[in-house]
Image: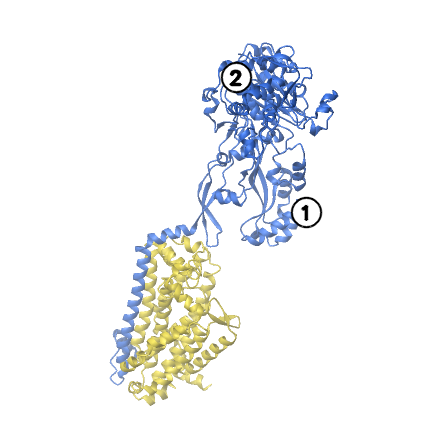
Chain colours: A blue, B yellow
Amino acid sequence: MWLKRRKKENRRFLPVREQKDPARGVFTRRALLFMAVQTVALGELGRRLYKIQIEDGDHYARMAAKNRISKRLLAPPRGRIVDRYGVALANNKENWRALLMPEETTDVTGTIERFSSIIPLDERDRTRIAREMRHQRRFVPVMLRDFLSWDEMARIELNAPSLPGVLIDVGTRRVYPEGELLAHIIGYVAPPNEKDVARSALLALPGMRVGRAGIEQSQDDNLRGTAGSVEMEVNAVGRVMSELNREEGVPGEEISLTIDRALQQKVLNAIGDQTASAVVMDCQNGEVLAMVSTPSFDPSLFDSGVSHAQWIEWTNNQRTPLINKAVAGVYPPGSTFKPAVAMAALESGLVSPTDRFFCPGHLDVGGTRFHCWSRWGHGSVDLHLALKYSCDVYFYEVARRIGMERIAATAHKFGLGTQLDIELPHTRTGLIPTPAWRQAHHHHWNGGDTIVSGIGQGFVQVTPLQLATYTARIASGRAVQPHLVRAINGEIGKQVQPDHWPTLDMPDRYLAALRSGMFAVINEPHGTAPKARLDLPGITMAGKTGSAQVRRVSRALRESGHFNSANLPWEYRPHALFICFAPYDSPRYAVSVVIEHGNAGADAAAPLARTIMRDTLLRDPVTHTTPPPESVADASSLVSDP
Amino acid sequence: MKFHKRLLRAEPSFRLMSKLWRISWLYILLICTLAGVGYVTLYSAGGGTPYPFAAPQAARFAVGLVMMITIAMLPPRMLIHAAAPMYVLSLILLVAVLRMGHVGKGAERWLIIGGLQVQPSEFAKIALVLALSAWFSRISYARMGNPLWLIPPALIVLVPVGLVLKEPNLGTAVIIGGIGASLFFAAGMRLWQIVLLLLPVPSLIKFAYNHLHDYQRARITTFLHPENDPLGAGYNIIQSKIALGSGGMWGQGYLHGSQGQLNFLPEKQTDFIFTMIAEEWGFVGAAAVIGLLLMIILGGMIMAIRCRNRFGRLIALGISMNFFFYCLVNLSMVMGAIPVGGVPLPLVSYGGSAMLNVMLGFGLLLSTWVHRDSVDDEDEEDANKDLI
C-alpha cells in the first residue's frame, strides 16, 4: 500500500497542493524564485568567467608569461688582449669558487665550520658570509671562498659528504701571463663601483670587471662585450624551476696590440734594475713595439684586492712602480731637445744650416753667464757640428735670436708637449713653456728662460713617448701618432698604413739636416755618443744624447772644476736621455730612453738605447707577420733584407 | 533515554534499508563528483602528488560521507529536538572563539578542540538553519502575518550575526544574515513586512561602512582599484585574474597551469582553488564545475519544494541557500567581483572544518529527502505534539 503511494508521489514532480497549509504554496513560489535567482547568479558568474578567460584571455596570458618568465643577464667573457703576433697578454682563466646553498643543509653554521677546517676562512670572509646569509633567500647560493686552487678544490670534493650544500662553481678571473712585463700597458681590472654600475647595468652582473688602467681601461667598451640572457621559469618566490631560453652573450672583442712581447722582454732585460723607461716605435706608422717602464708591479693583485701594506709600499716608493713613466713621467729633455730648436731656427729663416757661431764655453746675456757643457768651448760651430757636439752655446744663441714662441710651435709640431693619441689613460702632456704661459701664471718671462729652454732645460718637460714620437717624426717626416692597438677582433686598423699619416709641415732638406747632425752624434769622430754605434754590418743609426739636470748647479761648484754629478745623491743626479732612429738611410725604428738619475745621456742612456735598437733591428718585428725566432744567430741574414 | 526509545519506536531498524533506498543516490553522486574535482585539483596543487593536500582531503571526505548518510537516516523529529541545543552550542562556541580563538589570515577565527580546528561561524550557519526551521515549522502561515511572531526568529538570526561581526568576519556575517533572510522569505513573510524592513537598509549600510575595520575597508578599496597595490592586498585579485585569463578556452592542461604550479596563486589550495581549475582546464572545465555546483544547489531546492513537511522544506532550502552563498561568494571573490574574504569553495577547497560542515548540511538535506513524505498534522497543536 505505502509502496504504491510512494510511486505515485515520485511521479509527481511538483508537490500536491496542500489546501490546508497556504504556506506550502507560498514556499513553492518563493523557492522557485530563489532557484531563478541562483541560476541567474551563477550564469552571471559564468558570463564573467567567459569574459576573463576568452575575451580578455590574451591580455591575461601575456601577464602570465611575464609573471613566470624571469630574464637574467649573463656576464659576457671579457675580450683577450694579445700582442702583435697573438701571444696572450691578458686572458680569462677559470676561477673556482666554493658556494653554499643554505637550503640544502640543515646545519649552516656547522657546515661553514667544517669548511673552514678544510679551507681556512679569515675574519673578513666570515663577516661577508654572515652578511650575505642574512640578506639572501635560502635558495640563493652564498659564496664561501673565491680563487680556489686545484688542490683546495680537490680537498673540498673529497670532503663533500660532510659538507652538505657546498658546491663548486666556475667563474672567470682575469690573468696576466706576462705579469710585470706589460703591467703598465695592459693595466688591470677591478670590480665595478657604484658609479660604474649606474652608467651601465651590465656591470651589476656578478663577475663583471672594469678596466682601471692601461689598455684594460681605455679599451674597456670593446673588451666588455654584450651581455647574454637566459629566460627562466620562476615561481612566485623567485626560485628557478627550469630554463626556457638561453642566448649567449657576445664576448668582448680581442684587442691585438702593436707590442712585440719578445721585444718588450728584451728591452726590459736591457734596462735591468735601473729606474727607466724606453719606447720603441715604428717611425713610419707610429706603432709602439715596446714600451717599458721600470720598476713595475704585478697586475693580478688587483683582481683579488690589493692589501693595504702592498699599496703603501707602492705609493711610497720613490721609484713609482705604479706610474707608467713612458707616458706619465715628465722630464726636461735636455740636449735631446736641440734638434727641435734647430728645426725652429731653420724654419724661422733667421738661421741657415751653414751659419756659424763661436762657442767660447759660455754665453753672457744681460749680465748672466750661461755655460756650455764643455768648459773649453767648441769654437766655431754650424748646425751640423752643434748637433754633433751638442754645443750649448750655439743653441743658447739660436734660442735668443728666434724667441720661445717659434721653438714652442716647432716642438708642438714634433709632438713634444702635446697630448698624443696613445690609447692609454693617465698620460701627461708635459710642457713647452712660452712667455704667454708664464704670464698666465703671473710670472715674468725672462730672456734667460728662453736661453735655458734652448737646451731643453728650465720649464721644458716632455714624456719619453713624446721623445720617441718626436724622433720618429724627424726620421720619417710624417706626423705619426703613437698607438698601441693594432687590430680589434683581427681587423687591422688604418693607422697601421704609413700613408695614413700626413707628412710633416717641414721642408725635407731641414729634416735631412737634423738627421745628418744626429748621424754625426754617433758615427762621426768626436760625436757625443760613440758608445751608441751599432755593430751591425750595413746598418747605422742616428741619435741624440741628453742629460737633464734636476737641480741647479752653482757657478762656484762648476768653476771649481771638481764638479762631478756622479757623486751626487741618486735623487739629485741628472736624468740620462737618448733618442735615436735606425737604419739611418731608410728609417724604420725610433727609440727613446730615459734613465732617471742616470747621470749622463752619453754614458748611461746611449749604450742602453743602442742595445735596444740592436735587438729591435735583429728581431725586425715590423717586417714579420709571424713571430721571428727569439734569437738571430747570424746577423748577416739581416743585411740582405732591406 | 526516553528520546532513544521514541526513536526506536518511530523508526524501527527494519526500515533502515528502505530508508537507504529512499536516499537520492543521484544527489550523492553529484556530491562525490564535486569532491572528485576537488581531489584532482588538490593533486595538481600539491605539484602532481597526493600529498600534502589531496590524500588528507579524500580521507576527510570519506569520513564526511559516512557522517552525511548517517544523519540522512535521522528522522525530522529528532532533528527538531537537536535544533535548540545545537543553536545554543553554536552561540557558546562563537563566544568562546571571541574569547580565546586563534586569528588566522585576516579574520578567520577558529578554535582547536581535541586537535581539530573548528570554525564556529561555519557551524553557526547550520545551527541557524535548524533553529529557524524549527521555529517557522511551528507557526502557521496566518501567524506569520503578525510581526510579533517574527521577533523571536529575528533574534535567532541577529545574535549569531552580531557575534560573528564582532570576530570580526564581515563575509560570514553577511552570509548568515542572508540565510536567515531567505528562510524568513520562504517561510511566508508578508511582502509588506519585507518592504518595511528594507526601507532603513541604505542608512544601515552607510552606518556599517563607517564602523568597518581598517582592513575591511582596505579590502573594499583594493577590490575597487586592485592595480593601485599590485604586490600588496591587490596581489591576490590580480594573480587570480591572470590565472583565469591564461587558462583560455581549453586550459593549459592538467598539472601544467603555470600560475598555480609556479606558486603565483595565493592560497591556491584553499580559497583560490577555482583559479587552478580554470587555468588548467580552461573555460570549458571551469564552466562545467559551475554547472555542477548549480545542479547541486537546484537539486537541493527541488528537494525542498518536494518535501511535504514544513520543517524539512525549510531545512532543505536553508542548506541549499548556504551552499549557494558559499559558491557565490567564493566564485565572485575569485573573479574579482567582490572583495576578498576567506570563504572556501565547498568540497573542493582544502580544509577540514568547512568540509565537515558542508557534509553535515548535506546530511540534513538528505534527511529531509528521505523523510519527505512525513506529513505535517492538519492541526497545528497536534503537529507540534507529534514533532516535539
Which of the two residues, A398 or A30, is positioned nearer the viewer here? A398
Q: Position of residue B3 (x, y in %)?
A: 44, 85
Q: Secondary structure at mark 2?
A: loop
Toward which corner of the image does residue A270 lie, by quadrant? top right
Q: Is residue A117 shown to the viewer in this render?
A: yes
Q: Is residue B363 shown to the viewer in this render?
A: no
Toward which corner of the image does residue B327 lie, by quadrant? bottom left
Which residue extends farthest front? A367
In the picture provided, is A524 more to the left or to the right than B184?
right
Toward which corner of the image does residue A293 lie, by quadrant? top right
Residue displayed at 58% across by 9% down: A538
Disc 2: which residue: A350
| Chain letter, disc 1 residue | A
Q: Secondary structure at mark 1?
A: helix
Share a chain, discs 2 and 1?
A: yes
On residue A245, the disc is: none
Above or below for A57 versus A494? below
Residue displayed at 49% across by 15% down: A508
Q: Residues within 10 Å of mark 1 (few under 14, many from 20)?
A: few
Q: Position of residue B108 (x, y in %)?
A: 46, 69
Q: Work out how far the residue at label 2 is from the one at label 1, CA to CA, in angstroms.
A: 82 Å
> What residue type is disc 2 on?
Leu
Disc 1: which residue: A117
Residue displayed at 24% across by 84% down: A19
Residues marked 2 and 1 touching at CB (< 8 Å): no
| Chain letter, disc 2 residue | A
> What residue type is disc 1 on?
Ser
Q: Position of residue A179 (x, y in %)?
A: 61, 31
Above or below for B128 versus A88? below
Which of pointers 2 and 1 lies earlier in the amino acid sequence?
1
Which of the two residues, A414 or B212, is positioned nearer the viewer here? A414
